[in-house]
Image (cartoon, grey):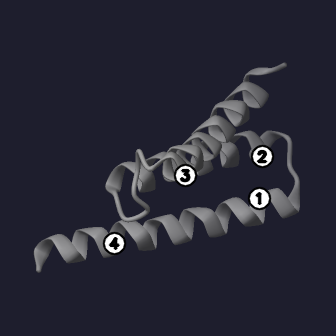
């Protein structure tokens, strides 16, 4: 396993771990913690995919990052109200 595969593995742990914590009720989907775990995981997976490229996986991570940024925006907007 090279360093980029390891980085991708850590990203996968973040994404799957965040979803598992959501299902356990330890995180809420509208919590900043859940959003940040998703963002870190997707960024780490993108880093891995820049070396070991797969178009389908790359595109899903780009969308995952976009959706997560939107979720963070909603949380920050609701905190101001």
Q: Are marks 1 and 2 in contact (CB under 8 Å)?
A: yes
Per the image, label 2 sits on a secondary structure element best described as helix
Per the image, label 4 sits on a secondary structure element best described as helix
* Sequence-wise first label, 1 or 3: 3
Which mark is in front, 4 or 3?
Answer: 3
Q: Which of the 4 image quadrants contains residue 66?
A: bottom right
| Residue at the outermost left position | 81
Residue 24 in the image: state x and y as whole percent: 51, 46
* Sequence-wise first label, 4 or 3: 3
**Relative horizontal placement of residue 41, taking residue 37 as reference (left or right):** right
* Sequence-wise first label, 3 or 2: 3
* Sequence-wise first label, 1 or 2: 2
The number of numbered discs placed on residues in the rendered structure image is 4
Q: Which residue is mark 1?
A: 58
**Residue at the location (86% across, 61% down)?**
55
Label of residue 23 in the image: 3
**Residue at the location (33% across, 72% down)?**
73
Q: Are marks 4 and 3 in contact (CB under 8 Å)?
A: no
């Amino acid at each position: 396993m090279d360093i980029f595969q390891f980085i991708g593995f850590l990203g996968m742990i973040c994404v799957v771990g965040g979803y598992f914590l959501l299902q356990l009720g330890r995180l809420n989907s509208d919590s900043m913690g859940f959003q940040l775990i998703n963002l870190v995981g997707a960024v780490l997976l993108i880093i891995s995919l820049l070396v070991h490229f797969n178009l389908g996986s790359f595109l899903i991570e780009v969308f995952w990052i976009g959706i997560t940024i939107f979720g963070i925006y909603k949380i920050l907007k609701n905190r101001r109200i």
